[in-house]
Amino acid sequence: MSASHKPVLFFGVNSEGLGHATRSLPLLQGLADHYDLHVFCGGRAYDFLKPHVPHIHAVWHLQLIYEDNRLLLHKTIWEALKTAHRMTVSGFSLAGRCIQQEPVAVISDYEPMTAWGALLTGTPIVCIDNQHVITYGDYPAPPDKAGKAAKQVMRNSNFWNHPLKHRTLISSFFKPPLLPGAEEKGVRYVPTTARPQVLARMGRTRTDGPVLVYQTSSSNKDLLGTLGRAYEATGLSFVVYGHGAPEGRQTPTGVQLRAFSEETFFDELAAAPFVVVNGGHSTINEALALGKPVLAEPIRDQYEQATNVVGLEMLGVGCGTEKLSVEDLIAFQAALPERTRAAANASCVDNEGVLRAVMQAIQEVNPSFAVDPNRALLPMRCPVVESASSGHALAA
């Protein structure tokens, strides 16, 4: 038990980009009300979360390397091996914290250091991410040899990031049936989360703004030219986040580049007729929360993003393309009414539902020390008021 008289809980957040950090934040803030919460991450995720959580600790993290909108897996692995000593130190340091602070459980949003720290110390671990849909979801297999190999690489990554899992919570915008035996292993789907800025705009969206284009990889060199030609062919205008200034060229007519600002981004997301993204889960989830169809150009050799495209197509809310073209944008515009209707019903955002599911999983893996979610979250379901006559608490 910590000095705060709350049970200690460790939570690891994947540090590649900001997607895991932004979607974890509502859950972290909810858990901090009930646990002495310690968050572990690195990079931009650390900088983003630091002002918002009570205790945050830097850990080693894998830095993915991209070139021309392609994941360079071998170069990523080689660069990781150069810092293997830091990875080892970080893992054992986290295991030492587990021994010293005795967390009731470790929660991991695809963060390997916390998962290995839990494994080395026998601490119960609960995974929550979208990546495990690749291991446990029953959806169409890739049609070619390269796709099947990429899927196996991702399944291997899922295993090595989380070699032991007492509960696996898949928080995904699409939910294919689970493979036989998955539920017996403690695997189940839970809702997704969204930031307050998204929740505030739900129910008051428009479609008269520019198409929002969000690039998590700035190495897509052909993007701006394609959008400029699409403007000439369709009349669609575009606002682009995450690309950076064009090298030695003017921005094409009909295309505006945006420096990142959360409020401007969400305003333009809420006003866009549809969005163009690489294929990251968080942006797709936030777009669907606002009823926006999605055209995805997944980063090549990044199988998680290819899986998200499968999800878009299964739900009828979007599609993917290997290399974005003017023809893709013309075809997407033609199919927009049908996809907009599908997107209006596709959101599975439920911040309270995710909090409840995680607290329930913690209780299942460590019932002796976990906070009882049925009692801790009771005020959310059943507000309490005072009886004027008796002074006893009554359920409203």
Image (spheres, grey):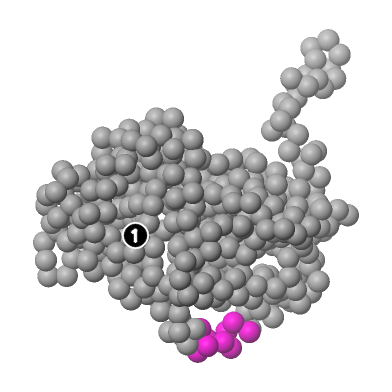
Q: Is residue 215 left or right of residue 181?
A: left
Instruction: Specify the segment rendered in magenta.
Output: 80-88
Q: Secondary structure at mark 1?
A: loop
Residue 327, given in percent of the width and then of the height, sits at 22, 54
Farthest front residue in view? 143
Q: Is residue 14 visible?
A: yes
Residue 91, given in percent of the width and then of the height, sits at 66, 78
Nearest the eye: 10 or 151: 151
Tell me which amino acid carries mark 1.
Thr
Check disc 1: other Cα within 10 Å, few if <14, some if 14-19, many if 20+.
some
Q: What residue appears at the point 34 percent right and 64 percent down from the top-left corner?
A: 322
Nearest the eye: 337 or 190: 337
Check the image and report above or below for 55 versus 357.
below
Q: What residue appears at the point 74 percent right and 55 percent down from the top-left corner?
A: 183
On the rendered image, what quadrant is the C terminus found in?
Answer: top right
Check the image and report above or below for 169 versus 348.
below
When asked about the image quadrant of residue 209, the answer is: top left
- Reading the image, the residue beneath label 1 is 321
Residue 175, given in percent of the width and then of the height, sits at 58, 49
Farthest right residue in view? 368
Q: Is residue 221 magenta?
A: no
Residue 176, given in percent of the width and then of the height, sits at 59, 51
Q: What residue appears at the point 44 percent right and 50 percent down from the top-left corner?
A: 313
Nearest the eye: 85 or 246: 246
The dominant secondary structure in magenta is helix
